């Protein structure tokens, strides 16, 4: 089996495991699967859950695509060759309860030839209401996953997440960060490609135990219409980031990806109120105080 096929098969198993675990955690809804093919080569499995006990809308997507890179992507990647292979799992979960956080994860592998290939990905949390104990739990487990491979991975990738998941036009982070990395290869990590695959899978396998714990902590908390309105406002910031800055969205659109799968990350309902401001000393104002780079959570 070629290395890229080994990666794709491991990612398929990650998708299966996470979908099964989320169905158990939700207790009501099930994922609907759509198998699709990409014009130009490859395809994927889009799985979406809607109207569950916990999950209002969630997607767990797998893809393995190949073909020729558009000129714009070639320039962005600074490569000459135009043949590519890319595989990955991408997840976004929008919960019903405002006290359960939005979560996003992506693990991916990109290859053009033996010399031009790398891993990327990450996982980050976007609470509508920041609960510090939950955020510390989240970051602690990410650090544990990173520490198995290199002592500096967590601190480096946490800083990169803070920088990447930043909404410049709002001067705030999308959420409370996590880890984000790109173009990992032996030359810049001192790890083999097999070790980097193991790291990618460790990040992927951290998703389910982390998120099911956060669901269990918060799924039964009471909320009212005011809390829902705040949730819709925070979702609007999530949508802004994904449509304006997200590199995965841009790559999918520029490589003729499947539009429903690409825009799966958008929330089912979001609202934009003119000049919305939280009340002083409120939970909402406190949440905004945490949407900054460089907060040490562990």
Image: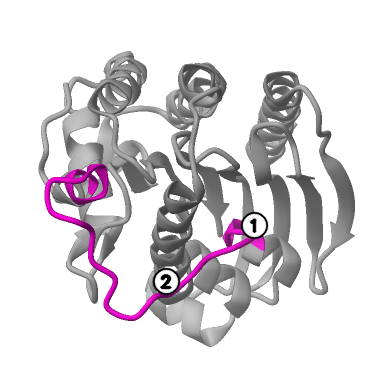
- Read off the residue under disc 1: 85
In the picture, the quarter occupied by the N terminus is top right
Check if residue 171 falls in the magenta segment. no
Q: Position of residue 208 (x, y in %)?
A: 57, 22
Q: Position of residue 84 (x, y in %)?
A: 62, 63
Q: Which disc is residue 298 wearing? A: none
Looking at marks 2 and 1 on the same chain, the residue that comes earlier in the sequence is marked by 1
- Read off the residue under disc 2: 240
Q: Position of residue 62 (x, y in %)?
A: 71, 45
* Residue sitting at x 62%, y 54%: 86
Check if residue 281 falls in the magenta segment. yes
Residue at the bottom extreme of this rendering = 71
* Residue sitting at x 42%, y 71%: 240
Q: Position of residue 163 (x, y in %)?
A: 21, 55
| Closer to the eye: label 2 or 1 | 2
Q: Residues within 10 Å of mark 1 (few under 14, many from 20)?
A: some
**CA gap, disc 2 and disc 1:** 29 Å
Please, what secondary structure does the residue beneath circle 2 have?
A: helix
């Amino acid at each position: 089996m070629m290395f890229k096929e080994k990666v794709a098969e491991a990612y398929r198993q990650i998708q299966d495991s996470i979908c099964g675990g989320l169905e158990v955690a939700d207790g009501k809804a099930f994922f609907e699967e759509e198998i699709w093919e990409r014009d130009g080569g490859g395809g994927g499995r889009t799985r979406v859950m809607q109207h569950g006990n916990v999950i209002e809308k969630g997607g767990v997507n797998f893809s393995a695509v190949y073909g020729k890179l558009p000129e714009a992507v070639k320039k962005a990647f600074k490569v000459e060759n135009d043949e590519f292979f890319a595989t990955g799992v991408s997840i976004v979960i929008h919960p019903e309860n405002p006290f359960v956080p939005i979560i996003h994860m992506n693990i991916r592998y990109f290859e053009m030839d033996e010399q031009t290939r790398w891993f990327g990905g990450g996982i980050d949390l976007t609470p509508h209401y920041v609960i510090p104990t939950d955020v510390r739990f989240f970051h602690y487990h990410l650090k544990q996953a990173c520490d198995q491979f290199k002592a500096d991975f967590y601190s480096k990738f946490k800083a990169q997440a803070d920088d990447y998941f930043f909404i410049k036009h709002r001067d705030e982070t999308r959420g409370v960060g996590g880890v984000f990395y790109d173009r990992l290869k032996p030359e810049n990590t001192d790890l083999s490609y097999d070790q980097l695959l193991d790291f990618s899978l460790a990040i992927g396998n951290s998703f389910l135990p982390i998120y099911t714990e956060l669901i269990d902590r918060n799924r039964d908390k009471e909320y009212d219409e005011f809390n829902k309105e705040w949730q819709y406002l925070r979702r609007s910031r999530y949508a802004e980031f994904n449509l304006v800055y997200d590199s995965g969205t841009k790559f999918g659109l520029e490589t003729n990806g499947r539009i429903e799968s690409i825009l799966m990350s958008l929330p089912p309902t979001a609202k934009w109120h003119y000049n919305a401001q939280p009340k002083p000393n409120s939970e909402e104002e406190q949440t905004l105080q945490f949407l900054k780079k460089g907060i040490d959570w562990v």
